[in-house]
Image (cartoon, grey):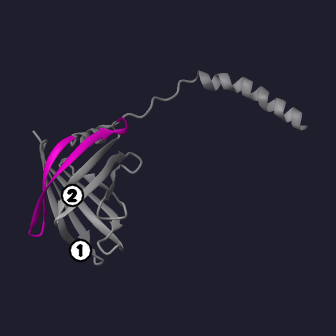
Amino acid sequence: MSKLTRTLAVLAASLVFTPAVLAQTPPPPPQPGPEHAKLKEMEGAWDCVMKMGDMESKATAIYKSDLGGFWITSEFQGDFGGMKFTGRGLDGYDPMKKKYVGVWVDSMSPGAMVSEGTYDAAGKVLTMTGEGAGQDGKPAKYKMTTEHKDKDHFVFSMYMIGPDGKEVPAFTIDYRRRK
């Protein structure tokens, strides 16, 4: 078969099949589900109290639903041990994994923390595990819990996971919705 014959055959097939393909109604785009609605409940401005050992400091956080309602972005600003601290998060729900997923970056670490997890059966406590750079710059494992007390109050807790698998409390942040 010559090159011209092959080209004409492909062109003819395209003319025959293209109208049929174009006539099909494309599937509707995905829509945010109930898991995304759960994240959207955090949207708003929050006043925070961060506790790490004996230290306590104040901070603020802004959560916004973004990217078609599939993701919630967060911006956290405060003072951490006398140093200015800024962090940003991107959280969503991955229907393929059937897990909540998140990425966190901040002004005290050169690397990103990537995490995933699930809510408890009551939908009150989100538990996520992740990996990122530790204080020494080496890979570290973390566990985070977000406990929803009510629509205007939640508590975030961070734990370091040691090589032996034991969890060591790192800090807590008490979030109160700004009125």
**Foreground pick, 105 / 18:** 105
Q: Write down the residue under mark 2.
A: 145
Q: Earlier in the sequence, mark 2 or mark 1?
A: 2
Residue lying farthest to the front in this orientation: 83
Q: State which quadrant residue 44 falls in.
A: top left
Q: Describe residue 85's horizontal placement relative to residue 149 as left or right.
A: right
Residue 66 at x, y percent in the picture: 33, 39
Q: What is the distance, in whole Å, between disc 2 and disc 1 at their CAs?
A: 15 Å
For label 2, the SS is strand
Q: In which quadrant of the rendered image does the N terminus lie? A: top right
Magenta run includes residue 81: no
Q: Which residue is mark 1?
A: 166
Taking depth in this image into account, of 167 and 171 the one nearest to the observer is 171
As helix, strand or loop, the secondary structure at mark 1 comes to loop
Residue beneath the point at 84% across and 35% down: 6
x then y, percent, for residue 41:
21, 40
Range drawn in magenta:
44-68
Q: Residues within 10 Å of mark 1 (few under 14, many from 20)?
A: few
Q: Residue furthest bottom?
A: 164
